Image: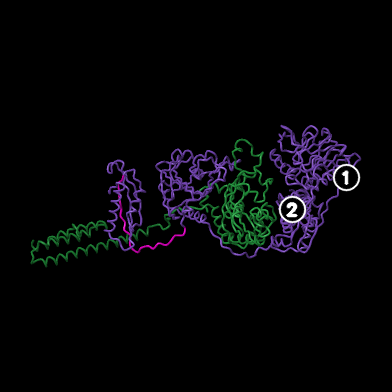
Chain colours: A green, B purple
Amino acid sequence: MALAEFLAELDELACEAVAAFETAGDADALEAVRIKFLGAKSGRLRAVQKGLAKVDKADKPTAGKRFNEVKKEIEEAFARIKFATAEDKLHLQEEIAVRLDPTVPGVRPRLGHLHPITQTIEELKDIMGRLGFTLAEGPEVEDQWHNFEALNIPADHPARDPLDNFYMATAEKVAGKSPSQTPPTTGRLLRSQTSTVQIRVMEQLRPPVRIISLGRVYRPDTADATHYPMFHQIEGLLVDRRVTMADLKSVLRLFASSFFEDDVHIRFRPSFFPFTEPSVEVDMSWHGGWIEMGGAGMVDPNVLRAVGYDPEEVTGLAFGLGIERICMRRHGITDIREFYKNDVRFLHQF
Amino acid sequence: MLISWNWLKQYVPLDMSPAELEQRLMMSGLNHEGTEPLGDDLAIDLEVTSNRPDCLGHIGVAREVAVLFGSELKIPAVDPPEGKTQVDDLVKVRIDCPDLCQRYTARVIRGVKISPSPPWMVQRLETAGITPINNVVDISNYVLMECGQPLHTFDFAKLKGAEIIVRRPRPKETIEAIDHRIYELQPEMCMIADAENSVAIGGVMGGAQTETARKTADVLVEAAEFDPVSIRNTARALNLHSDSSYRFERRVDPQCIDWASRRCCELILELAGGELAQGVVDVGRPVPRREPIVLRFSQLKRVLGIDVPAQRVREILVALGNTETRADTRSIEVVPPSWRRDLSREIDLVEEVGRIHGYDKVPEDVGMPMVASTRTKEDRVLSKVRHVLTACGLDEAMTISAVDEPTSRSFSPWTDAEPLRSLTPVLRGADRLRTSLVPSLLAARRTNEALANPVIELFEIARVYLPQGSELPAEEFMLGITSGRDYPALKGLIEAVIAALGPAAGLEAAEAGCELLEPGQSCRLQLDGHLLGYVGRLREQSLKRFELRAPTTVAEVKLSLLVKAANLIRPYVPQPPYPAVSRDLNLVVDESIRWADVAATVRANCGQCFEDLQYCDTYRDAERLGPDKKSLLMTITFRSKEGTMTSQQADQLRDRIVTACRAKHGAQLR
């Protein structure tokens, strides 16, 4: 091949390539043009390079030099155009940014919500944990020993009335006898308080004991704004040498101060529960008045004896609080039934 | 218990304001429920706990006031003038059921004139919430509200055979009570009968036949003591609760029985005239003697946390009616009064001293020794599960533990046994303790669908109750979910929960075989060979059964297995500082080949360099792949611990995997 012919082909390629780069509309088109001319396998420059071998040997240095010049020229043109395109794009983006509405919300993931009762329980557990109380669990379906007898509630006690408890049907009960005629003394029932767990723990452990029991309890109340046949209780128990009512008051004060993030005071009003003596209703100071917290007392010696403890050796304090009531007060919920309706809109408020 | 301010004044000076009185009573055990002005009187509503029946009368409350304010209690002396006729000559009394009636006393007044009560008595009764009837009936109610001892007055002339027999009812016996309703009597009830018929339901309500009415001239005054359990059962069985039954259920003061009878007679003579027969018919057990109780002063500090001076202890106990029988520097021995049957142990006296001395003296700022408390593994696992689920957009629900019978049958994958039943439904027909959370969650879903709530993603962590014959049921913590996402998404969510707990054992899946769930869109999960739970989409008929419209998926997972398998504190594994290389693989296999088996082969052939295997998709095309064939698309990620992996090394591993899959599962690379 004549040198002139080769050089002409090179020049033509250079012109075509630069023109093609300049007219390429966007990055994709530019890339296509690059492949067409500069492609490593089948680009036009590569094809022309093959022609270099056919040039007379004497002309080869000239032809080679010129080829490299043209190659460089095309590559530079590509780089220049590419840079320009990128810059344009940037300008374009800036223009769009000016038109964007920054108040349009982002794409937000939907987070789930814990039930308000769980949130309250978690907080109560946390506080009691800091006071050294360890969580204990026990069954919800109980026998009479743990729900009554060991708690100093003897067989003829009104608290065992079938109308005040959910007794379980047994085979013969299903067969006929009406429940109202025979107050069951051996049957099972849904626990009416979480004190049952305290008995189970004390039966297993020697003092000192410092536990909270917590969970669902059941009492036959007609469901209304303030009653539900199922609710949650948290109960604390501390048995050791030298435990007194002053400790009880102090634990409750620390507890209430932590929960309500305020320095509250505790007031005891005498009351009656079979499993504690003395028994008290607990109030805490709140906004200049007193509000009811729950029931408490010193563990009755009969209860200590029932689990094999010596009441001459150890004393115990115990208290119980209704979780729904605490949660309702905390969030201003006015109907306890809301907790068990599970309306997603309700759950999402907390 | 409604207390009349004016009436109370008769027994104890009331120099304090009503507010102060209410406050002091509340702080010593009689909770103040409210106060209503009535004319020139106040009706003060006090809550009396079941251990204090002595406060179910004005004198009992006055006694508390006298103790609290250090004032004198004045109990009227009663000494009604008696006639010549001996009461024994007029009436005979016999107790045939001493287990149901401990004591029965009768007095007889002849020649009374029935008329309305005087205004002062009417006012007091009305303040105490009692409707006046006639002078004789009102007097018995007045004495009841005065001292807490229930009384009954019979029209003596109508008692056949001039005889009182306290007995159990005859078979099929009925009685018309003074409320003019007929009551069918049951064998364990205590009846007051004359020579022929029952004339009163002992301790609960009188009979219509013998009630004192306008023409009554002679009355028999009954003052008795009945067995508390029998009274409670009778009142409940007949659904007949009266002021009398309320007090007998809580036990009356045995010492007061005769006082109340004489007081009643005195007032009748005063307001209705007549002549009282001499003496009293008093049958049954005499007043039991009370055992002395020793209170060691050291016990006060030991229980109350405060010292109470011995002199103050003595004052309190004596003011409350205890008789001091012995005392030294370390203890005091007292005999409790007859009206305080709740006092029988040392701890009872500790409480008495504490409540009167005042719990406000107990400090609220004592230091307690610190002890370590630990969170249980179960507590930590449940908390983690909750966090993963809320992060995935699920809301926590809480549903009641009992369901009705059809609901209990709708889904019970954990047991075939009949669920436990409560004798009374926990809520509207719900008398079965649930064996699965899923039906309850589907009901909650329906509630939300009815409200047109757009996103219903609910989970619950609660127990199910799996019957175990005569044992207490197995109470298993379950995680229940109902979701609007599709089956693979919900299955993935369960996988994510499990992965967060990092169990060593792998999760396995098999066909669910549940009637509730779509066969091709559900599975049963196993962990270390144990049934872990179910995930799946509800079939069309299941949706209908639960009255749901939108496609629904559910899952239930046994949390005890996860608690056991959870690996909460993970060991550190150093991560190699070299880049990962991944290869996509598209393997055509027979339909019968399962992903889990192919995945196991892939993993087994990666050697040391395996990092991750992602399932991408399953592709089916009878024309291109052939019938009964499917193509499994996956991405395998390799990373070497020794150095940067080259393309060639990655390709070699891929080829080894393909060869192994071909040999083991007949897989073809596509």
The tag on residue B337 is: none
Please state the extent of the stretch shown in magenta in the rendering.
Answer: B568-589
Q: Which percent across, then down, holds residue A190?
A: 59, 46
Q: Residues within 10 Å of mark 2 (few under 14, many from 20)?
A: some
Quick one: SS at disc 1? loop
Q: Is residue B277 located in the magenta-colored stretch of the structure?
A: no
Question: What is the x, y in percent for residue B206?
Answer: 77, 38
Q: Residues within 10 Å of mark 1 (few under 14, many from 20)?
A: some
Q: Is residue B354 visible?
A: yes
Q: CA distance from mark 2 to mark 1?
A: 34 Å
Q: On what subunit does the disc labeled 1 rest?
A: B
Which residue is at the far right?
A: B84
Point out which mark residue B344 bears: 2
Sequence-wise first label, 2 or 1:
1
Between residue A344 and residue A183, name the one nearer to us. Answer: A183
Side of B621 relative to B163 (left or right): left
Determine if residue A335 is in view: no
Image x and y of residue B47, in percent: 71, 50
Q: Residue at x 14, y 60 (%)?
A: A48
* Chain to which mark 2 belongs: B
Q: Amino acid at mark 2?
A: Ser
**Label 2 secondary element:** loop
Residue A64 in which image quadrant: bottom left
Left or right: B326 as drawn, with respect to A316: right
Do the residues marked 2 and 1 share a common chain? yes
Height in image: B282 above or below B19?
above
Where the N terminus of chain A falls, by quadrant?
bottom left
Residue under the point 66% across and 45% down: A160
- Count of picture labels: 2
Q: Which residue is mark 1?
A: B80
Q: Amino acid at mark 1?
A: Pro
